Image (cartoon, coloured by chain):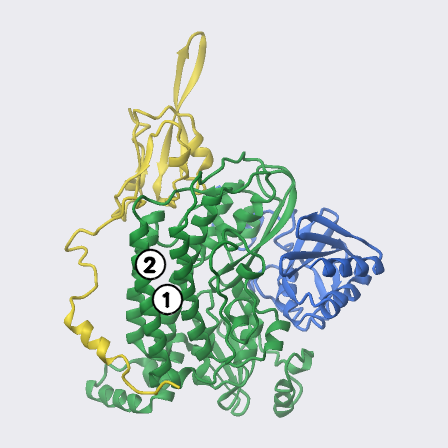
Chain colours: A blue, B yellow, C green
Amino acid sequence: MSETLVQVGKYAEEAGTKVNPLRKNESLVEVSQDRLKEFVNHLVNDSHVRHLMTITGLDLGQNLAITYNFALERDKIHVRTTVPKTKPQALSIVDIVPGAILYEMELHDMFGIDFIGNPWKDQKLLLPDEWPADLAPPLLKTTKPSEIRRRLGLEAAKP
Amino acid sequence: MPTRKVGAVIPEMFRHMLEKPTTEAYPFKPIQLTERFRGKLDIDPAKCTGCQVCSLVCPASVITMVDLGTRKVGDRELKVRRPLFDLTSCIFCGECVDNCAFNALELSKQFEIATPNKADLLMNKAVVK
Amino acid sequence: MSTPPDQQRREESAGLMEYSTESLVPFGPIHPALKEPEYFKLILEGERIVNVIPRIGYVHRGLEKAAESRPWVQNMYMFERTCGICSFVHSLCYGQAVEELTLYQVPRRAKYIRTIIAEMERIHSHLLWVGLMGHWAGFDTLFMWVWNDREVVLDLVEAIAGNRVHKSMNAICGVRRDMPENMTDRILERMKFLTDRARYYREVIDTEETMLKRTENLGRVSAETAEKLCAVGPMARYVGLKHDVRLNDPYAAYDEVPLDVITSNEGDVHALLKLRLDELIVSANIVSYAVKNLPDGPVRVKVPPIIPAGEHASHCEAPRGEIFYYVKSTGGRTPDRVKSRQPTMANIPTALEMLKGQTLADIPIVLTAIDPCFGCMDRMSFYDTETNKKWTWSGEQLRQYGINYYFPERAKQQRKFARQMGSSVNESLREAL
């Protein structure tokens, strides 16, 4: 599997970044939004890293991080890109990896990120229909659980 | 290629008809519990010192510490606390049992604890002296 | 809904993976015709399904948000309760993700015990599933017998862990209880019993006409589609892909026990039945080996309640597929972010492709074949583009419809019986007939 990592290093160089080895068998590549699709295309179609485990969202304060978690045998390759909270729009990768469709819908529900190019991007997957439109997405650090309970009309659970 | 037929299970069906049923006879007969069965929580008040570790580790927020006054040790006034258990939320994980340094807690074999009164499941053995 | 119905129909059935927005009928989840949002909206053409739109999240409890305000150990119990049938693997995967951030090693005996309990859970889950397939196919005898045999493995788990379902055996860096004394002979004897029963059920499924009629040539998906849609677990293995986390990225003691990954080349629901029963036999073999070769030593290492900063992702093989946990710590008593991805969510796109082209009567079998873990299939709504009819059915009505479709003589007998009984006729039966 080391040849795959060497190839990933080359694609990272082309995209203007480098591979950050977190520990044995796990590495992280931070790519900017405009080079992301090219990088993922190389990873999936040229290096045959086909299995996308999931897409993870993170609240980093000023920005939101979108991490694509790929797996190939013993190696895990995380591809991370950031979008600002003021304009949370990202490019969808469903044309390269069709299995990403539900994960992007989940990020849209939970973090408010708009994936341009996802055919079901305006539909809710996990949130209830009566989610108030002015209530912030639930997994942001600024949204408090007590606020969610109050707005959805649920009884306050034990503190 | 195995032959397809209807009624491949008929010989087994006859065997089942001749044996006794496998349903447990509970509640007409007592049920067998294993040695490690996790039933209702029980405390030995004599061993409890009020260190409150059980209250801090409980995942379901079952245990609250109740202030019972103070006592004098040398020239210091130390608080006396004891735990109060609201067993309606207990998930029978056993974290409190594992973490009690004085072996005051145990998960008993009692499992018939359903009741219409919430007060029945409020265990205050350690609080009332 | 401005395009005429037959043009929509043509666009919808035009090929796989064509996700242009015109090909989807804008039918909910919020639509004035529906009484309430449903799990699946199925768009039919006469008897054949043309498109399926999923809507999940009815048992979404916000565990990822709740985990950010609870200590590390308490989160383990909370994530164990994500699912009843694969609860041990959830706490195992979370535990593994957190252990990597500490500097402690898991003792070898603890890894073996984790393997034993995880495989027993797999046996339990597959037995439960085979029974459910029998129930939805109308073969209730198989359902009762299989669930009787399931008690054997549940009694073993209760003897080791104390609970039957939420085992609460995992701790961070170890297991909480050691194996009891004198369990080896009991475990070996019961594993042999379960292996014999699994072989018998495999033979029944291969020869019994009832099961064959309902599961043959059903739910076909090409291997390339399954790989592109990132299918996991038995859903990837039944079309020939050798995707198994225990083989590709061994965790716990899986690199030291005899593991045999079963794949199938036939690619229909019947193959899925045989595949899960074969996996059961492999699991029983692993448990027997691990119990005989259990190493000595401690079972747990005490870890301080503050986990160092870092992030790690871990994956495990649950009975239904691959479970994924990502944990991020900023050096505190509570995590900064926990992400958990259950296997059924990864399998939903593949399940939707399996459903296209099937008839109405086959839906319960195909949906149960993916081994779903998102509550029961309580309500489904249907929209027939040919007759422009919309209706809703409960799971029981759909099951009865499927049985009557395939076994019309049984339906005739039931109708005669219902007439004789007079007014005590089952409402759903009348509707389904």
Question: In this orientation, does residue A157 appear?
Answer: no
Who's the residue at 55% across and 88% down the image? C385
Q: Quadrant of the C terminus of chain C?
A: bottom left
The secondary structure type at the circle numbered 1 is helix
SS assignment at label 2 = helix
Task: Give whichever of discs 1 and 2 has the lower sequence position.
Answer: 1
Q: Nearer the viewer, residue C209 or C244?
A: C244
Q: Residue at x 32, y 50 (%)?
A: C184
Please state which amino acid type lies under the numbered disc 2.
Val
Figure quadrant of the N terminus of chain C: bottom right
- Residue C270 seen from this side: yes
Q: Chain of mark 2?
A: C
Left of C309 or right of it: where is C135? left
Give how far apart the Cα atoms at labels 1 and 2 are.
10 Å
Residue C361 in the image: above or below residue A58: below
Viewer-proximal residue, A95 or C411? Answer: A95
Q: How far across and down, in percent of the image, does residue C283 sit? A: 42, 61
Label 2 sits on residue: C153
Tags 1 and 2 touching, CB below 8 Å: yes
- Depth order, front residue of A100/B8: B8
Q: Chain of mark 1?
A: C
Q: Position of residue C261 (x, y in %)?
A: 50, 66
Q: Residue at x 32, y 62 (%)?
A: C192
Q: Amino acid at mark 1?
A: Leu
